[in-house]
Amino acid sequence: MKKIEPTLLNVQQSAAFLGVNSATIRRWAKTNQLNGIKVGSRGDWRFTEEALSKLTSKPSIKEERRKFAKITELLKENENSIQVMATSQHTHLIGGDPLPAEHFHKYKKIHMKVVRAIANNLHDFEKGAANFRRLGVELARDAVKDGLSIEETVNGTIFLKQAIWKKLEEVGLLKELSTQDLYEFSHITGSYCDVLASKIAFTFHNVFTEKVRASEGRFRVLTEKSADAIALVDRKGKVLHASTSTKEVMGYTPEEFKKLPNPFELVPPEERKLVTKLFQKLLKKPGSVERLKYQITHKGGYAIWVESVMSNLLNDPHVNAIVINYSNITARTEADKKLIKSEGRFRALLNASSDVVYHMNPDWSEMRHLEGRNFLADTEEPIKNWLEKYIYSDDQKRFKEAVKKAIRSKGVFQLEHQVKQVNGVLGWVFSRAVPILDEDGNIIEWFGAASDITKQKELERQKDDFLGIVSHELKTPVTSIKAYAQALEIMFERKGDTKTAELIGKMDAQASRLNRLICDLLDVTKIQSGRLQFNEGCFDLNDLVREKVEEMQRLSEKHNMIKKLTATKKIYGDKERLGQVLTNFISNAIKYSPQADEIIISTSSNTKEVTLSVQDFGFGISQANQEHIFEQFFRVKGAAHDTLPGLGLGLYISSEIVKREDGKIWLESTEGKGSTFCFSLPIKKTVGPKQPAKKKISHNNG
Ligand code: ADP
């Protein structure tokens, strides 16, 4: 072997150096137009740069460069028309259907790549051939996927070769080429296309076809396992394959089903048009899926409902057909019909009701729908800003809290609140919503109804106003009666007429009772309208107990009032109002334990709160009644209680006062043994005033 000089260029490098084709370089070397050296066992050529440079000025080189540059340019410009020409040649000479649209586009793309590759590799045959082998594989794979025959694909490349030549002829370039050039160009394009054709024909087509067959087998196994009937049909609707479950679903064996002209024959005429139209639509889009519920006639002659899913898998090499999946939904459809019927009844029921109806999503972040019944504005599409739309701003916080509680407990949501009516005016509703749960107990949605209680609320307000005015008007004369009675009592006592003085004393006591009743009524109306005033300050609860016990002890000599005062902390609040609570506890203890002779009043404190309790040993209260004891106008019914006077307001007022002071109120009681009424106030309130001295009790309707 000869030593290769580093300055020597091989054929490709030389072709690139001169800008001509490598075959031309070889031809010149063979005909001694170019001085070269044969190297290696294959006897390839090497050239010096000097030898090559001598040729650069050669007119034939310039000429060749120009021609090939022109061809390259031409091919690049005409990729598209060359492809069209090749396809029409194919159709013209071979006959049969032209390539379907989706294939056409793909082949166009591949053929364009071929033309581009020819154009770019005119100077380098080796590289071109390698490229073409790769393209051949690509083309073969696609051809098999698309179900094209070997002839169709090989012919495709042959017609492409012809089309390229035709184009060159059309533009007169062929005339410009010498016989030698023609030979060379034919050699290049011809060899390239032949490389393609032979690759497709002898290697890959078979390999890919085998692969597709194997996967088809797998596909068939899969369809046989399904309970649904599965059919493969071609683009004309002809059944290529039907799964065995066709028998179960439609009564036809796969063979019988295959013999049908097309599966749409089974669809009743009135629906057939719709189904075939959908099929046509599907054909236009490879990879698309269409779904439709329709009836088909079972082999037994009766109609069944199927849900059919049609998939265009014509492009899928594993299927290469339209796949129709039939699932029998007759039972489901019947159930649906029943559901629709019962839903219809439910709807009718809703329509008959005058309540506003609404649906909320599980966490109430979205209102799905609301029928406003001309009271509230309707919401037809789901909305997120329903709180702002419907709920009065002052009630929004309270509303959200009630919702949170209902979600947490998965229980009923229930609230009286104000709403923005459709006419822009505020109104009142009593709203109730229940959660709908799934099998696992998760909330699917909330279903609610709200009744318009605006009128009722207005009446209530009028009643409160009336009570307010009346009790206020009553208070003045009663105070005067008391003052006169006390003056008279003193006068008669001075005169020594003790009998009359005693009677007048009793009159004064009754006037005091009347005064208390009026005060209670007044307080209630103030609570309702949010006008109950508080004067807060720091004081010792033990002092308050001592004061009140002394006062009350005078009223009942029968009961011995025992004080157990262990609270060590002062509290912050309205002394008078809390004194009112204590008075109520003690007077109830006296009233409802007529047989007993002891009442224990205790205070205690820990780091968090101060507690007060009043214990008696009287009637006690049953568990059922305990639940309602702090409600307005609630009084225990029964022989013992009925004889005792009262309005059932004292404990209601007490609970409102304690709540307002951020405290807790409760009782412990056993019927027949006695009761202990308690309240506690948080220590933080002992720190000092945080709020203005005068404040209003909040309006509580919830
Ligand atoms: P009133 O005493 O004016 O009826 P309250 O609101 O103070 O109103 O009390 C409500 C009801 O609770 C009373 O009617 C009574 O039946 C019951 N009750 C209150 N305190 C006691 C108690 N210490 N023992 C038994 N029952 C009580």
Image (cartoon, rainbow, N blue to C red):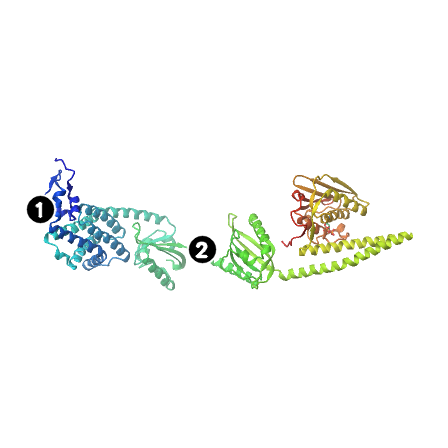
- Image position, residue 487 (x, y; %): 85, 54
- Name the residue carrying label 1: 33
Mark 2 surroundings: few (<14), some (14-19) or many (≥20) residues within 10 A: few
Residue type at mark 1: give it.
Gln
Which residue occupies 35% across, 51% down?
244
Mark 1 surroundings: few (<14), some (14-19) or many (≥20) residues within 10 A: few
Which residue occupies 72% across, 38% down?
566
Q: Secondary structure at mark 1?
A: loop
In the rendered image, the vertical position of residue 54 relative to residue 77, given as above or below? above
Q: Quadrant of residue 453?
A: bottom right
- Image position, residue 504 (x, y; %): 85, 54
Q: Is residue 407 left or right of residue 620?
A: left
Q: Nearer the viewer, residue 266 or 233?
A: 233
Q: Nearer the viewer, residue 161 or 689?
A: 689
- Name the residue carrying label 2: 332
Residue type at mark 2: give it.
Arg
Distance (Cα) linking label 2 and label 1: 88 Å
Q: Quadrant of residue 305?
A: bottom left
Numbered label attached to residue 245: none
Q: Is residue 418 left or right of residue 64?
A: right
Q: Secondary structure at mark 2?
A: helix
Q: Nearer the viewer, residue 455 or 698?
A: 698
Label 2 close to label 1 by CB (< 8 Å): no
Q: Quadrant of residue 550?
A: top right
Residue furthest right as drawn = 496
Instruction: Single out the mark in the foreground, 2 or 1.
Output: 1
Query: Counting residues from the N terminus, which is met first, the one under dot 2 or under dot 1?
Result: 1
- Image position, residue 327 (x, y; %): 39, 54
Residue 457 visible, this angle: yes
- Image position, residue 65 (x, y; %): 15, 51
Quarter of the rendering occupied by the N terminus? top left
